[in-house]
Amino acid sequence: MQLCTRNQDPAILVFCIPRDCRPFVLPVCLVCVFPTPLMPLHSFTHVGASFLCWLLSADCCHAEDQYIEQFKDTLSTCVGKSIAGFFAEPIQGVNGFVQYPKGFLKEAFQLVRERGGVCIADEVQTGFGRLGSHFWGFQTHGVLPDIVTMAKGIGNGFPMAAVVTTPEIAKSLAKCVLHFNTFGGNPMACAIGSAVLEVIKEEKLQENSQEVGTYLLLKLAKLQDEFEIIGDVRGKGLMIGIEMVKDKTSRQPLPREEVSQIHEDCRQMGLIVGRGGLFSQTFRIAPSLCITKPEADFAVDVFRAAVTQHMERRAK
Ligand SMILES: Cc1ncc(COP(=O)(O)O)c(C=O)c1O
């Protein structure tokens, strides 16, 4: 991976707020040193109160303080005085739809910029209205990135991606010896991207994401009270994570084989969901933005049936 940045310092930070159900264990950052390609993110920890901070809209957030302290530690002990860039997904995707504590990203961006780094929002999963309340995930954090990367939803299935940045950073690309893409600026991809944007607007898909996503989230959240093995239901719009645990006291991840069995039962009953998290313990629900409430009801019914079936198997 190559980045032409404001400075030549080699460090690229990829911040990972992991989640393994243990409350109040501090997170650890993964640091990749240029030109090492980005490695898969490793999950380490989780601060249990983070989502609560969002809900309560508290001015001070214990989880945010803890994450920021850890982030500062990483900046002062693991990288040089200046850094090149910092990547963050507004909600972590592959790691199991993990949300940052309120205010974290804003402060992290500031710390990165103080060290000369550019801030990059990876909107590959969160962009194009998926989060409902906002078109871009970074807007939900009140930050303005220097670079935004986007893909997936941009083409509604067509293979395309885009990078948006400031004129200053874009100009720096021209200073590189060679910046070249075989398919860059492909006219057919551009036409598809424009058509997708129009459909999102015309069919009010962002609004649908907000309405049906919240409806689905609330229905799934009720299952958390119903079942001992549902440790957390979280997310925003149509990006919803259901974290499976052994029990609510230990909050240890439900063993992979058990999660796989529930996963397969869902599939057999007609519900396809994703998985994520370090222990593959979180179901990731990110349906098409045109999903309807009856379809959301179907998903909840199937999921409930699969978990019930699993509890019955367990009891035998
Ligand atoms: C958050 C995130 N960023 C980047 C990528 C890579 O996107 P692409 O495969 O379009 O290069 C993915 C793919 O799953 C992703 O989920």
Image (cartoon, rainbow, N blue to C red):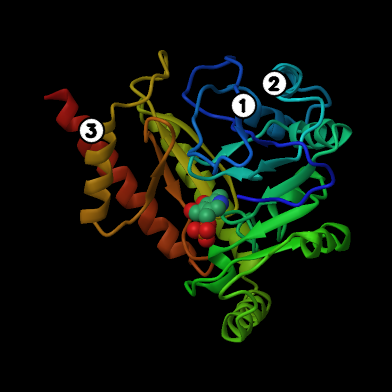
Label 2 is placed on what type of residue? Thr
The percent coordinates of residue 240 (x first, y second) are 51, 46
Q: Which residue is mark 1?
A: 29
Q: Which residue is mark 3?
A: 257
* Among the two numbered marks 1 and 2 on one chain, the one whose residue lies closer to the N terminus: 1
Query: Quick check: marks 1 and 2 in contact, CB under 8 Å?
Result: yes
Q: Nearer the viewer, residue 213 or 60?
A: 60
- Quarter holding the C terminus is top left
User: Disc 1 to disc 3, how far (Cα)?
Assistant: 29 Å
Q: Nearer the viewer, mark 1 or mark 3?
A: 1
The residue lying at 64 percent from left, 68 percent from top is 180
Asked if residue 194 lies left or right of residue 231, the reply is right
Q: Which residue is mark 2?
A: 74
The residue lying at 68 percent from left, 76 percent from top is 201
The percent coordinates of residue 209 (x first, y second) are 59, 61
User: Disc 1 to disc 2, how far (Cα)?
Assistant: 7 Å
Q: Locate residue 211: give its quadrant.
A: bottom right
Label 3 is placed on what type of residue? Glu
